[in-house]
Amino acid sequence: MTDTFKPPLADIDAAFGVVGIYEVLGLHAFAGLDRDSVDDVLATFAVFVGQEIAPLNRSGDREGSVLTASGVVRTPAGFKEAYRRYVGAGWPAAAVASIAGGGGLPKLVATAMEELLTGANLAFSLCPMLTHGAVELLTRWGSASQKAHYLPRLVTGEWTGTMCLTEPDAGSDVGAIHTSAVQRDGCWHVTGTKIFITWGDHDLADNIVHLVLARTPGAPVGTKGLSLFLVPARHGGHDGPLGPRNAVRVVSLEQKLGIHASPTCVLSFEDAEAELVGDVHQGMAAMFTMMNSARLAVGVEGLGLAERAFQSAAAYAIEREQGTRPGRERPHPVAIIEHPDVRRMLLRMRARIDASRLLIYRTAAALDVADHGTAAEDRNGAAALAALLVPLAKAWPTNVVNEVTSNAIQVFGGAGFIEDSGIAQLYRDARITSIYEGTNGIQAIDLVFRKLDLSPEGALHRLLNEVTEAAASLLERDDGPMLSKVLCASVDVLVDATRTLVRARQTDCDWALAVATPFLEAAAVVIGGGLLARQLIADGSAGDDSDVHRRRREAAAVFHLSHLVPEAMTTLATLDAVARSVRMFDTSRS
Ligand SMILES: Cc1cc2nc3c(=O)[nH]c(=O)nc-3n(C[C@H](O)[C@H](O)[C@H](O)COP(=O)(O)OP(=O)(O)OC[C@H]3O[C@@H](n4cnc5c(N)ncnc54)[C@H](O)[C@@H]3O)c2cc1C
């Protein structure tokens, strides 16, 4: 029994309803697109990833990408052909905004497609994910000639993109970047070493467009002195054939815990010819377009993998027989799913996944309104909401996936620890998601120091109003009064904790820094609780008891609201204990 993955179209459909798919489809930009056509796109894409991409997940992990003697990267068997079919079918372009020359699907729908792709094969999905981020960046910041030369090929996936920030001494602290850029004879040249560059070299596409943060001569220290450069791996290719390679060398390929098929490169830029993107010293602002896109996408990676881990564990639990139930005679072993403790693990996984999906899709729907809302007020409100949600939607689902894949191994027992089960790969692959694209610790600091604002017109206020409204709607259920009371109380506790944090940002910075991560975790559970409450009500009125997905969602939502939300309230009520213990903790060498 190895891991299994069925595109979770029924759960995606339910989540769409909760986060406002009709509001999104009602935006002028998506005129002509209706619910049926969205369902058709997803169903067709699901078949494509199931047939072409998912089968390469295990073999890609075993074989891995390798650096050949000639200094170029070779991907695992089947990847090149699968990528060619992916591009040939027009999938990369489908999700790109029409202003950039793509199919113009809403971000919400594109996010569901990303979920399917990452669930099928995380390592493969990273290449299109970064290319998509490069498209968003160039659409906003590229010059007319950059848009004309690079965008069309990136949009189709004919060429791919990378994001080059990290250096040996510049990880979380991007401002420490040393890579330099100088201008000679009207052309920029970039020199420096970038590490950990995902899909930094490969054989899937003819050309790779590196987006590189670098420092120009005399630039201010820190992030304010960074500029962004476009460095093509190969010259030319605009009007005629591709020319020779640019001076970008793959020094080595990292040997990693997971995502073996995704080549993680050390790249040396050796006076490589480059083009400035945007203005000098505007690099961080431009790169943030790509980073925000990638942060949400990494949250989606957590979701896709967690869904796959749940499905595999649930399927295994139905097949695997072990032990008996109280009152039953030997020799009649039962399927392990009959053991309440196994069902509890699956339920906890399900609740975490459902809340993650809603949080991510809510963010994507807000981004659609931010980009395409008719009134400026709507666009600005949605943009503020999305900015608040992005660190939550990146960090929480990627913490969740670490817990979920670990629990999936637990459900498999010893078999889960053995590579043949496939679950071990999901656990290994998941581990990176809470680290890259800004570690989850950095996301929590971003949330607490840049995004928290309790003003009545602020995004947090609006979000918490949504939670309170959802709590009120629960009253129509038999168990509603209890669930509603818990959810309302959690909003009060979250508001109190936010007030304390906002004060501490000014008066006791270390206090705020010490509790940022538990605050983010608990806030995600409360906000996720509001979204699950809405899903519970919507599922209740749909009322089809024969639908296993609906019944699972109902149990998961009740578990989340009645058990996980109170857990989060305890966390919020004891933040001071966290900060005081962190202060007490002796960090001198023992
Ligand atoms: C497989 C893989 C793929 C990657 N792909 C890319 C890529 O395509 N492009 C790219 O540019 N980079 C990429 N990265 C780099 C990745 O984004 C960094 O590893 C990540 O940002 C963390 O940086 P670091 O590894 O230097 O850790 P450090 O910055 O050294 O952090 C170590 C620990 O300290 C904590 N920490 C650091 N500073 C602070 C602070 N100020 N406050 C609180 N805590 C802090 C961190 O949260 C973390 O827990 C990739 C990395 C890996 C492993």
Image (tube, rainbow, N blue to C red):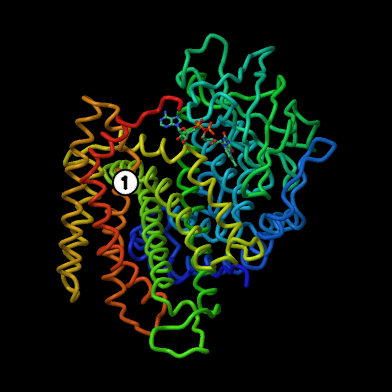
Q: Residue at x 16, y 41 (%)?
A: 456
In this view, the residue in front, 359 or 481, is 481
> Please, which residue is most extreme toward the top here?
218
In this view, the residue in front, 381 or 171, is 171
Image position of 475 with respect to 72: above or below: below
Q: Residue at x 37, y 64 (%)?
A: 351
Quadrant where the N terminus lies?
Answer: bottom right
> Please, which residue is most extreme toward the right here?
69
Q: Residue at x 55, y 32 (%)?
A: 142
Q: Residue at x 18, y 76 (%)?
A: 478
Expressed as whole percent of the image width and height from the top left, the position of residue 470 reads 22, 61
Quarter of the rendering containing residue 510: top left
SS category of the residue bearing label 1: helix
* Left or right of 298 in this view: 541: left
Image position of 115 with respect to 340: above or below: above
* Left or right of 187 in this view: 28: left
Expressed as whole percent of the image width and height from the top left, the position of residue 379 reads 32, 44
Expressed as whole percent of the image width and height from the top left, the position of residue 136 reads 52, 41
In this view, the residue in front, 337 or 35, is 337
Q: How many marks?
A: 1
Image position of 440 with respect to 33: above or below: above
Say few, some or many: other residues with alpha carbon within 10 Å of mark 1 (under 14 / 14 to 19 / 20 or more).
many
Amino acid under disc 1: Ala
Quarter of the rendering containing residue 33: bottom left
Expressed as whole percent of the image width and height from the top left, the position of residue 209 reads 65, 36
For ligand 1, tell me if the residue under mark 1 lies within 8 Å: no
Which residue was labeled with disc 1?
382
Quadrant where the C terminus lies?
Answer: top left
* Left or right of 374 in this view: 470: left
In this view, the residue in front, 93 or 214, is 214
> Please, which residue is most extreme toward the front here?
590
